[in-house]
């Protein structure tokens, strides 16, 4: 009889944010303004070249990214979404018997990638909806290979600060890889947000101490750049780590259109500015409306809001879904009276509030 690997025993297939025809979708933190127009143009231009394999080294994109981030091309690996980079990390560094440390109520792909390669997750609770770096430090054992940090955290939208991270990194053992997922980096407004790329810049200003070396920073083109459907994400790390990830990577992991579109989107500063402004305006509007409704929300540094609702979240999700709007119920995180809602366009936000009012009546 055919038997699946025992590592798969504890893995459930991923349930994505539902796309329902005709509905406004505020369930997957996509950019409500769509893709960057420059990205669309470049996809059209490259359409005739799809008979050719893509550049297996993503040279152009890495070159542009390195310039923009102030790091070296050798510090970068591009993936089929940052989801793929999580798989490369797991494939490069963990196996059965290893432990990884993951927070409760965070992005599900850390647990998935770790379990797929046979490692055992050790879970740490959030503290007031935010990552508790002290508790995470204490959860590290001699078996720990990876610690996953999501900043801002999906689904709560909270951040940990530079000072907390610095302290954590100094204490962390040298043989533990620290993954810092910054999928919502471009949306953050807090002045206390860690400037993690500074760890890779050789300069007098920053202390590139050895304590800081085992880090992979993850970012993506799926969120503010509006390219979720093309799948492009990247990892920033020191060259030795990038080299290990490249060993686990298939040769043509990022498709041609994705590489071209991401390269173009990177240069579209206007689109980024507009997307961020839309997010800030939407945040302000939603905070005010939620306050008036007496709904507790967690202030967000990302493009979504986690809120506690006076209802069963699945029932609320179904009601909203049947009335034209899809949001994300938090039951799968054990938060049965919470939902996560992506900040949309002004019209979408208004529609959400109107439907929410009706649903809670
Ligand atoms: C959306 C998201 C990602 C993005 O993944 P891609 O594979 O790049 O689309 C990564 N991490 C977090 C926390 C996310 O919310």
Image: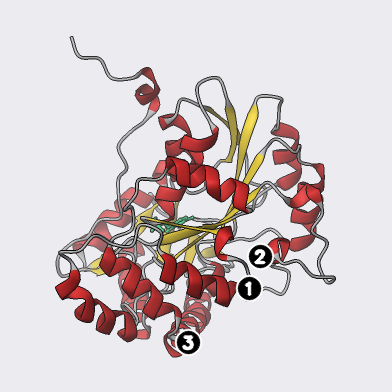
Q: At 46% from the left edge and 36% from the top edge, which residue is drawn? A: 91
Total labels: the figure holds 3
Above or below: residue 174 compared with residue 262: above
The residue carrying mark 1 has its beta carbon less than 8 Å from ligand 1: no
* Residue 291 in picture, x, y percent from top left: 54, 73
Q: Nearer the viewer, residue 123 or 181?
A: 181
For mark 1, give the secondary structure.
Answer: loop
Q: Quadrant of the C terminus?
A: bottom left
Residue 246 x, y percent position in the rendering: 47, 47
Q: Position of residue 82 (x, y in %)?
A: 44, 55
Residue 179 in sight from this viewpoint: no
Residue furthest toward the bottom?
Answer: 270
Indicate which quadrant contains ligand 1.
bottom left
With respect to residue 339, does 100 lie above or below? Answer: above
* Neighbours of disc 3 within 10 Å: few (<14), some (14-19), many (20+): few
Q: Give whichever of 343, 231 is nearer the camera.
A: 231
Q: Which residue position holds label 1?
A: 70
Disc 2/disc 1 C-alpha distance (Å): 8 Å
Give the alpha-carbon distance from disc 2 to disc 3, as whole Å. Answer: 19 Å
Query: Dot 1, how many residues are within 10 Å of its Cα: few (below 14), some (14-19), or many (20+)?
Result: some
Which quadrant would the N terminus be assigned to in this image? top left
Q: Which mark is residue 227?
A: none
From the viewer's side, name the closer residue of 67 and 289: 67
Q: Which mark is residue 197?
A: 2
Query: Mark 3 sits on what residue?
Result: 269
Taking the spot 35% from the left edge, 25% from the top edge, the residue there is: 8
């Amino acid at each position: 009889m055919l038997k699946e690997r025992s590592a798969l025993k504890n893995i459930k297939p991923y349930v994505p944010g539902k796309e329902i025809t005709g509905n406004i979708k505020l369930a997957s933190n996509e950019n409500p303004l769509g893709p960057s127009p420059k990205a669309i143009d470049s996809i059209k231009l490259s359409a005739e070249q799809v008979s050719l394999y893509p550049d297996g080294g993503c040279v152009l994109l890495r070159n542009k990214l390195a310039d923009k981030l102030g790091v070296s091309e050798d510090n970068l690996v591009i993936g089929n979404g940052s989801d793929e980079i999580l798989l490369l990390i797991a494939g490069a560094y963990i196996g059965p018997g290893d432990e990884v440390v993951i927070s409760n109520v965070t992005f599900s792909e850390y647990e998935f990638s770790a379990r797929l390669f046979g490692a055992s997750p050790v879970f740490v609770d959030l503290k007031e909806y935010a990552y508790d770096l002290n508790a995470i430090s204490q959860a590290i054992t001699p078996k720990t290979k990876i610690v996953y940090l999501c900043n801002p955290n999906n689904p709560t939208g909270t951040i940990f600060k530079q000072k907390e991270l610095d302290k954590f990194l100094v204490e962390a053992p040298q043989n533990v890889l620290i993954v810092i997922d910054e999928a919502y980096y471009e949306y953050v407004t807090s002045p206390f947000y860690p400037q993690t790329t500074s760890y890779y810049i050789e300069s007098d200003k920053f202390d590139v101490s050895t304590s800081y070396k085992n880090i992979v920073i993850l970012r993506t083109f799926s969120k503010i750049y509006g390219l979720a459907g093309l799948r492009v994400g990247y990892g920033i790390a020191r060259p030795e780590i990038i080299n290990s990830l490249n060993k686990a990577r298939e040769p043509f992991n990022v498709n041609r259109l994705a590489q071209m579109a991401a390269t173009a989107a990177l240069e579209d500063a206007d689109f980024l500015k507009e997307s961020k402004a839309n997010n800030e305006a939407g945040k302000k509007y939603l905070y005010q409306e939620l306050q008036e409704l007496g709904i507790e929300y967690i202030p967000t540094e990302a493009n979504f809001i986690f809120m506690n609702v006076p209802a069963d979240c699945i029932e609320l999700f179904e009601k909203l879904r049947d009335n034209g709007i899809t949001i994300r119920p938090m039951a799968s995180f054990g938060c049965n009276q919470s939902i996560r809602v992506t900040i949309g366009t002004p019209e979408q936000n208004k529609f959400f509030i109107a439907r929410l009012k009706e649903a809670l009546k």
